[in-house]
Amino acid sequence: MKLQKAECLHTPRIQELFSKKVAEYTDGQIKWNILLGKQKDGISIFRSATLTAEGDKIQATNVPAFFLPKVPEVMIQSIPFLFDGVEHSRRFMTSEPANWISQKIETAYNVKVLGHFYNAAFISVNGISPIRHPSDFSDKIINGFDKTWDPLWTDVKPKERRFIGTQEAWTGALVTPQLDFDINIGMLQNNHRQRLHERFKHTTIVENFYNIYYTMMINKDTWNSLTYFQRDGIEKAVKEAQNASIAYQLDTTLWALALNQSESTNIHFLTDNERKEWKQEFYPKMLEAIVSKSANPTETRQMIKKIEALVDDLRWQ
């Protein structure tokens, strides 16, 4: 498989679809241009997540939701195993809890939140030895999960934790001969570009260890200056892109999984019992940490329960 395929999947495809649909549903009145990051030798060394149209018609940003520090509740999406799968995630994007988070973002940043977009749920735990149980993280040198996720390691004690970001990892920073990492935690679709197969021969796929949603925002004054027709067109484009974000992520996962297998990586999916073990270890720690940072802990607990309840009726289908 060619590397270029990964570049045309998921986030870039969502951006392109959204831009096309905005123009279509506003009869060309709104043009939504995509700003790409700089590249060196074909490798993105910085990719701007910003989407900005030319002129003064519209300005907006598509950022990972956990980069919104004024709203600690956005970290709800990172509670390990809060989500049960793709359909659960689809329901969350337009749910009461998602709207509740949106309102908090709007108040804190004076923006209009257009919607949340699904980015990733299939997390790759790469090791020089198999990682099957929480205890396997003990006394290991781990890359991934910055200080925001400190509560995960309250009982499981890694030897050392570091954080090498995606852009740096794309240059081979995780697999250079002098490095001593035992484990890397990240998104499955990044493994190939980061050349992880050169060092980590064991990969455990952990669905919903954490979820990542991109939050689309627009300057509130700019939004208010648009006509009803223009706003309606943008909202229609958001809905289509939200649904597409689910499909594109599944495409990306299947592509990345096949590519990892072709590179002689030993792939393991958590069994039901292993998943229960991981959830019992990690879920309550992150939940309590997020609740404790919330301005209204009681309300935050209620919203977490509502997210859990979104999946209940799926069990009857």
Image (cartoon, rainbow, N blue to C red):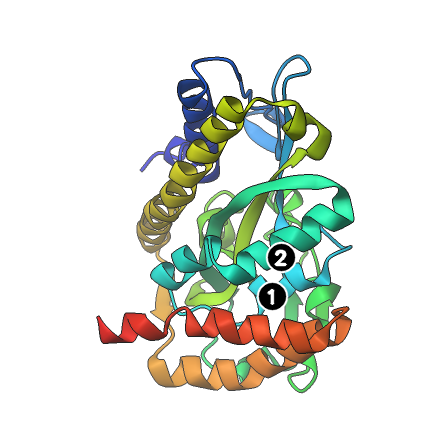
157 vs 250, left or right, is right
Mark 1: which secondary structure?
helix
Query: Vertically, is 107 above or below 302?
Result: above
* Measured Cα–Cα span from mark 1 to mark 2: 9 Å
The residue that appears at 37% across and 44% down in the rendered structure is 243
Q: Are marks 1 and 2 in contact (CB under 8 Å)?
A: yes
Which residue lies under the disc numbered 2? 101
Residue 200 visible here: no
Circle 2 SS class: helix
Position of 248 relative to 161 (above/below)? above
For residue 64, which numbered disc appears in the image?
none
| Residue 306 placement (x, y as % from top left) | 50, 72
Is 296 left or right of 184, judged from the image as shown? right
Image spot of residue 18 (x, y percent)? 45, 30
The location of residue 126, given as percent across then percent down, is 50, 64
Mark 1 residue type: Ile
Q: Earlier in the sequence, mark 1 or mark 2?
A: 1
Q: Which residue is mark 1?
A: 76
